[in-house]
Amino acid sequence: MEVDKNGEIDSDSSEQVVNPWEVSAKDGGKIDYDKLIDKFGCQRLDESLIDRVERLTSRQPHVFLRRGVFFAHRDFNEILDAYEKGDKFYLYTGRGPSSEALHLGHLIPFMFTKYLQEAFKVPLVIQLTDDEKCMWKNLSVEESQRLARENAKDIIACGFDITKTFIFSDFDYVGGAFYKNMVKVAKCVTLNKAMGIFGFSGEDHIGKLSFPPVQAVPSFPSSFPHLFPGKDNLRCLIPCAIDQDPYFRMTRDVAPRLGYSKPSLIESTFFPALQGENGKMSASDPNSAIYVTDTAKDIKNKINRYAFSGGQDSIEKHREIGANLEVDIPIKYLSFFLEDDSELEHIKKEYGEGRMLTGEVKKRLTEVLTEMVERHRRARAAVTDEMVDAFMSVRPLPSMFD
Amino acid sequence: MGFSKIELLDRLQELEIDYSKYEHPPVLTVEAQAKYVSSNEGALSKNLFLKDKKNRYYIVSAMVDTKVDMKVLSQRLGLGKGGIRMAPEEALGQLLQVSLGCVTPFAVINESARDVSLLLDKNFKNQTRCIFHPLSNDVSISLNTSGLDKFLQSIGRDPVYVDLEANPGVGKDQPPDLAVYVPSGSVVIPELPNKTSSTQPKNVSAEIKPALPAKPSKPVDKGKSVAATSVQSVYKNPEKFVEEILDKTSALLLSEAKGESMETLTETQRKRLTSELTHLAIMYKNTAYAEGFYAGTKYQPYRQ
């Protein structure tokens, strides 16, 4: 299945597949992001936009922007235009709580969203789609709700400001104004269209068919009357991984028909598995990713044993031709998480030209990741159940733009 | 009141932990214990109750043959060379609620020991059974480490096994490998001999509990690990918060400079420190808000 500009599905299995439930590259190769942008019809996030962000926020752009992790967008420039004029926006992101074990890839959108919240000083809603996981992963209602709360703790540990953040689980929150918007959206999307966009078939249960509006309506401020009363024109920016694009293509299509503004998107690439771009990060293979519960020892082990190296087979060969940076996972991971641009450049140069060995690169990566995971763990230990309750309460946020 | 040996053994039975019990006259040393409990029953343990200069406490439980070098241990914990010593007898009674000769991993069942860090010899794991005192030195029990782990997990603790004989060296490229096991909460032993209210460690938490009087022992099965409650207290208590800030600042300032010039050094360090401290501050703010929020939910308006 793949999705083209009209949002319809072609069945051309030799092409790459990117949708909310499946991501695979063509012929076991790498994901072609240029092709993806073209197919989806979104835009590249270029230097000028990044510079603009730096100017407007008076701080260095987040490492994910500088390194092209968040690389595509829809109407992000409009958000910036409005911001420059003094019109604020709010952020919307989410997580499908399918498991308790979060890995670093899961944290990426949250780390970026936290930066956006701090840099632009705007509020944030975080949706935990426990209903979705209950339906797709066949979990019990109780289990998906429990996982939602557990995941909420990891999310909170990323450092969101409680005076500007509302976390909600679908099972708890759907109803009232939120549901009214869901029905409005649902009325605008035919069964055929939904089947085209999401690949549903006659075999799928009706729960799945009726889910997309749930993920769509947090883009509309009127879904949160306790947060944005009377602010129906407040814009929404959605940081997400690019596989979520179909939901929001549908939302943007429907919005004008409901008299709402279209949400803007800022989209990220996929985080590679330890075994390489062609590998899949899977919950069943704990060695395919670094988990936030991994100990320093685990991290060191996993990096040393499983991280796919672009280094050459022998030291002599390596010193002669250098490493293949394109496929080297430690370099890729460092480009996500090593803050210092000049240090990364130095490592890439030395390693690519054969003067630095794989072991050194892996050692540095282990340091960086261990520090990150340790920091996350400490922050998570500080999250109490009361704090989760507070984040998830329906309450006003009077200082949300301060 | 601390747990009694009967209560502990009942608890082990409830948890369906398999153990064997040996009663004998009270023993104060491993040599004496060895006279009554043969090595066929399991590996005897030596148990040390230690304290560092910042009033943090540790139980180190090891195989009798394992050599525990206090200097090395102190360094691996990040306490410098002479940072750790045997804890005073009063602490035994106040924190572990056991008497002399009874130090045992099981003492952490007591709420008063919640900030005590427990380090277990990794060599225990190779043994079929290991022998400990169940809070009293006139009984010994032998059990497999899986039983001990099950017990620890049931009170919200993660079992920590350490290679006590390792000496990995501590230096600028090698941070103290056991530093993560240093408790975040320090304990000041009050002078009052009375057991109930005085076993409440004073500096650990300024937690507001609306409607409930300060109870001396919280229910043990709350499911929070010791590390978690201690970390939380950093964000509830301004003094600990400031201490954490100063610790982080000095750690950063003392770390390797990598040969950069003074100017860029300050710049990079400043950036890192800003990011670290902002993160701390957000957690502090969130904690304060959450506590206020909770208080608000329990708020009782004045009766007319």
Image: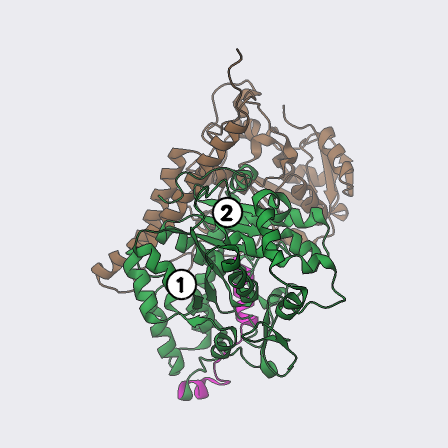
Mark closer to the observer (2, 1): 2
- Kindly identify which residue carries mark 2: A222
Give the overall secondary structure of the magenta segment: helix
Chain of the residue that carries numbered disc 2 in the rendered image: A
Whichever of callouts 2 and 1 sits on the residue coming sooner in the sequence is: 1
- Identify which residue is drawn at 59% across, 42% down: A176
Examine the image and state in which quarter residue A214 appears.
bottom right
Amino acid type of the residue that numbered disc 1 sits on in the rendered structure: Phe
- Identify which residue is drawn at 44% across, 42% down: A230
Task: Please state the extent of the stretch shown in magenta in the rendering.
Answer: A296-320
Q: State the CA–CA distance, disc 2 to disc 1.
A: 21 Å
Q: Nearer the viewer, residue A58 or A238?
A: A238
Please determine if labels 2 and 1 lie on a single subunit: yes
Q: Can I make out residue B218 in this image?
A: yes
In the rendered view of the protein, which quadrant contains the N terminus of chain B?
top right
Q: Can I make out residue B43 in this image?
A: no
Local packing at callout 2 (Cα closer than 10 Å; few below 14, some 14-19, many 20+) is many
Q: Nearer the viewer, residue A155 or B249?
A: A155
**Residue lying at the far top of the rendered structure:** B304
- Kindly identify which residue carries mark 1: A76
Q: Which chain is brown?
A: B
Whether A312 is among the magenta residues is yes
Local packing at callout 1 (Cα closer than 10 Å; few below 14, some 14-19, many 20+) is some
Residue B23 position within the rendered picture, expressed as x and y whole percent measured from the top left: 76, 33
**A2 relative to B234 in the view: left or right:** right
- Identify which residue is drawn at 48% across, 47% down: A379
Circle 2/circle 1 CB separation < 8 Å? no
Q: Which chain is green?
A: A
Q: Relative to residue A131, is residue A50 depicted above or below?
A: below
Circle 1: element type: helix
